[in-house]
Amino acid sequence: MKGIVLHGGAGTRLRPLTYSGPKQLIPVANKPVSQYALEDLRDCGVRNIAIILGETFPELVKEYYGDGSRFNVRITYIYQGKPLGIAHAVGLCKDFVGDSPFIVYLGDNILQYGIKAHLERFVSKDYDAMVLLKEVDDPTRFGVAKFDEEGRLVKLVEKPKEPPSRFALVGVYFLKPVIFDVIRDLKPSWRGELEITDALQMLIDRGFNVGYDLVRGWWFDTGKKDDILTVNAKILDERITECIKGILENSKVEGRVNIGEGTRIINSVVRGPSIIGEKCIIKDSYIGPYTSIGDNVSIIGSGVEYSVIMDNVSISGVDRLDECLVGRYSKIVRAEGNRRAVKLHISDYSEIIL
């Protein structure tokens, strides 16, 4: 079994952050979103993984993941370049896959319970392809499944105006190499892309055994700021354990808080669930629940809650930051004047004076 993590796409809904890096490297609980996909594959026993690179700073992806050895996997990089569709990206992996079954995992997707149980079903049922489905409130945003009266999957429709069901395609696909034969015959959709839904539909139409499995628990494709903040809170709530490696000076830590090495918490209050990276300075400040703070961050005389603060950020004199997604190397300082809560979504290397 091999794995493919898609790391392309422009990330337009997360601009301006994605002007300086791919959306899949935005951290959730101090870990890039795509790392959850890679670790999910690894924990299922998949150790040979291809990462498909797009146009948005592919060098940053290679710099972070390297050869994969520190994640106990072997990584192959394949360049897609322009976002020409999921099926196009999969088609580039024919030589990498060879004769093996494989899993395609969109790098901006996170599943609460992972994919191990779904992989076991794919293998036991000997499907030629299997999709994951999740009931959603607004299926018009996704590829949607249609079933016959006996509950068999008969059709997949991409972003339909009139959805045939409320079951959306989750961004994980279990496939056998037969998929490459139909991708070869695909025509671009109205979006100019080779759609994975069209490829799967062609498999169904040609009589191949295409199954599905329903996802339990939550699932997010982290394409927007609110998605990042929500899944950050979910993961902190469910997975963070108390671990304090930094130094506390006249400070109080309440709840499940993870503090990295070299970090100093001075005259401050930190409430969990939250995580603070390495070599940070938190002084005369309040860090509230559901906050993730990266490495080398300085927060002085400020309050932060329900936010994601990336590496090398400086915040000073701000009474309260709430629901904020703050890019790397940003600086937020308070000028003299009126003091009130603010909401921010700013890119890397930004400076804001309030």
Image: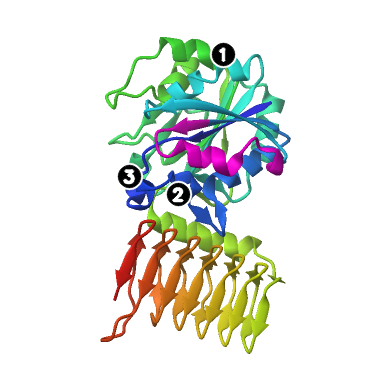
As drawn, 154 above or below 60: above
Q: Distance between the residues labelled 3 and 1?
A: 33 Å
Q: Name the residue under label 3.
A: 12
Q: Mark 2 points at which residue?
A: 222
Decide whether residue 220 is among the magenta residues.
no
- Please state which of residues 43 and 247 is positioned toward the viewer in this rendering: 247
Q: What element carries label 2?
A: loop
| Position of the C terminus by quadrant | bottom left
Pinpoint residue 188: horizontal percent, then vertical percent.
Answer: 33, 19
Q: Name the residue under label 1.
A: 178
As drawn, 330 above or below 52: below
Pinpoint residue 8: horizontal percent, then vertical percent.
Answer: 44, 35
Q: Residue at x 58, y 15 (%)?
A: 95
Q: Is mark 1 on a helix, strand or loop?
A: loop
User: Which residues lie in the magenta part?
Assistant: 52-71
Residue type beneath disc 1: Val
Q: How far apart are marks 3 and 2 (CA)?
A: 12 Å
Residue type beneath disc 2: Thr
Q: Distance between the residues labelled 2 and 1?
A: 30 Å
Judged by depth in the image, the label closer to the viewer, 2 or 1, is 2
Q: Which mark is residue 2?
A: none
